[in-house]
Amino acid sequence: MKTSRLEAFSDGVLAIIITIMVLELSAPEEATVGALLERAPVFISYVFSFIYLGIYWNNHHHLFQITQRVNGKVLWANLHLLFWLSLIPFTTAWIGENYDQTLPVVAYGVVLLLCAIAYFILQTVIIKSHDTEFPLRKVVGSDRKGKISIVCYFLGIGFTFVNTWIAIVLYSVVAIMWLVPDRRIEKSL
Amino acid sequence: MKTSRLEAFSDGVLAIIITIMVLELSAPEEATVGALLERAPVFISYVFSFIYLGIYWNNHHHLFQITQRVNGKVLWANLHLLFWLSLIPFTTAWIGENYDQTLPVVAYGVVLLLCAIAYFILQTVIIKSHDTEFPLRKVVGSDRKGKISIVCYFLGIGFTFVNTWIAIVLYSVVAIMWLVPDRRIEKSL
Amino acid sequence: MKTSRLEAFSDGVLAIIITIMVLELSAPEEATVGALLERAPVFISYVFSFIYLGIYWNNHHHLFQITQRVNGKVLWANLHLLFWLSLIPFTTAWIGENYDQTLPVVAYGVVLLLCAIAYFILQTVIIKSHDTEFPLRKVVGSDRKGKISIVCYFLGIGFTFVNTWIAIVLYSVVAIMWLVPDRRIEKSL
Amino acid sequence: MKTSRLEAFSDGVLAIIITIMVLELSAPEEATVGALLERAPVFISYVFSFIYLGIYWNNHHHLFQITQRVNGKVLWANLHLLFWLSLIPFTTAWIGENYDQTLPVVAYGVVLLLCAIAYFILQTVIIKSHDTEFPLRKVVGSDRKGKISIVCYFLGIGFTFVNTWIAIVLYSVVAIMWLVPDRRIEKSL
């Protein structure tokens, strides 16, 4: 099967996930600076999740640029990734209202961790479904970035119980690391 | 007519249906484990419906990979399927809040049954609009899976009045049966 | 310019319009038949609007199958149509709660009328942007169906002040008339 | 990389942004003219934002018709534009309820200004990623319209503190200026 429809469906789901988060950002009742500032934590968590989802869309885009065909396993590995990404609006809304509480920060980290694992599975399933000459195999290589991310999420989840800000810093480090575009795939295109 | 735009529109509708269900999963007011656990039934019903919609997207994808052209009847048979699928977020929200009550479980089963019938009609209309050499004809064959599903939904709806869990088990059996990818179509591509 | 991106954007908007209406169909608080029946008028107005939007998607699909290229005027005539279609969820929600009151039925009819006029404008702009050999010119011809629809909407809006059911019957007649697929375009493809 | 998937994702996000604004336009509780008229400011701000987003979609469409390839920087410049556009439903809802108050009108102007700057950055990044023969370079030229818009937004934000209507007139002038299609790109296609 060709990849076009899988890409179209994933684009649709990602576009909706990234946009419905803005529904949480309801307009303040009053037209005052104070009422606007009350929305600041919700706004910042929206910016953060927007960047994260942007990174996933970018990586997904790169991944399927190089993928030649999909089978049933790839379809399900992709749906599995979309499932965990679809929980980001939920954890974003929760952390936006409770950014200084342990549980919402843990929940945010767990969902990020599960997204990273699902992406890793998707990548592995795609590589397995192609032959040994498949360029992604060389490009991804040891996938250092993917592994560092997963370690950071685990550390973040653990450190939340000490101080939620350590977790938030760790998740930001992962985001910044990924914002540097994956030149390995780009070059091989 | 070509199938591309029908696929794009269906992908859009399915992407929205699968994603708006997450809006029901509103963030808990309090940042406690208890408040999070209260969301568990809503979460489980979301997972369940996500898998069901994933199965429909997968089968729809396979079906139109093999379909060569569409006419007005196919467009309407497809819209008919999308209509019943669009009710899944409604029954999912209802069952999530009332998973142990007869009526929401019956409603959930009835919508699944009508989706299955609509899919069967769509498949039949597509086969009729192609000539006798059309590969889908041989591939689908007696469509055993489709028929077993419809029987399970009928049984499930009936047994809900005895015990809602029998119905939930039956609907899960159908989902598991479909998770095994349809190798017949995949091979013939 | 090619038509592909205009079609993709319109598919996206129509898919969202047709699906967000289901958000109005909130799950009943209680798991009783009475609570479900209270949703009946909202459900029926959803079915009705789903069919109407399905007709518009079908006709739009046929129209752009035959259109060879678009210019700035066509882009705006299309956005103008999408604008009026985007108000259907609003009038659907209002009529669903107040199907026996004059104003919501008038509002529903006015939006349908403006959609029909916008579709007529779009068709005219497309024909003008192509040369005299353009097949749509012959196919559309006198556009009898379009004209009858506009007359029915005017009559419906007027008769609402006598009895809302006359209007609802008239709008249903238009829907049934359009459900018969437009064989003129289909044949010429 | 090809531009097709970037266009599909942007179409998805823009389609959702333009459509979810209609969710703010909730159906009136009562079926009276008074209740409908109360929605008028929300409706007018919806029309206004719909036109603005339509302009952005049109310009985006023209821009990528002429763009031959994208790289990682273009993907992020595009996501940056989509981020600011995604805030339009928020400011639209706020201005709709408080069109005569300074702060919501300032917020509306600031988001429009940031969208214009993001569009300018996207355009610049695309031009830089192509060689000196790239047609967009000649077509965009001094980008007078883009510069006038940014000046109008700055003036509008400033004059809001004198009278909100001056700002609203200035933003309308920008919209009307852009409604005239960009013939420079259209001719060169």
Image (tube, coloured by chain):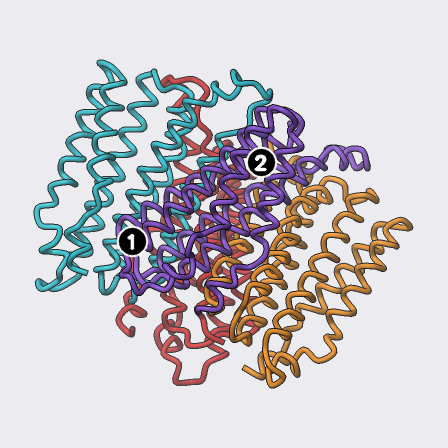
Chain colours: A red, B orange, C purple, D cyan
The alpha-carbon separation of the residues under discs 1 and 2 comes to 34 Å
Marker disc for residue C128: 1
- Amino acid on which the number 1 mark rests in the picture: Lys
Marker disc for residue B41: none
Which type of secondary structure does the marked residue at label 2 adopt? Answer: helix
- Which of D80/D85 is in front? D85
Q: Of circles 1 and 2, which is in front?
A: 1
How far from the left and from the top, in percent, is residue B30?
60, 31
Task: Write the residue at 12% across / 45% down.
Answer: D143
Residue B42 sits in which quadrant? top right
How far from the left and from the top, in percent, is residue C52?
56, 46
Evaluate whether residue A59 shows in this view.
Answer: no
Which type of secondary structure does the marked residue at label 1 adopt? Answer: helix
How far from the left and from the top, in percent, is residue D124?
16, 51
Say which chain tag 1 marks. C
As drawn, C3 above or below B146: above
Task: Write the residue at 37% across / 42% down.
Answer: C80
- Amino acid on which the number 2 mark rests in the picture: Thr
Task: Write the residue at 41% across / 74% down.
Answer: A67
Marker disc for residue C92: 2
Q: Earlier in the sequence, mark 1 or mark 2?
A: 2
Which residue, as the protein is rendered here, is positioned at the far top?
A: D162
Image quarter (top left, top right, bottom left or bottom right) of the C terminus of chain C: bottom left
Q: Is residue B85 left or right of residue B147?
A: left
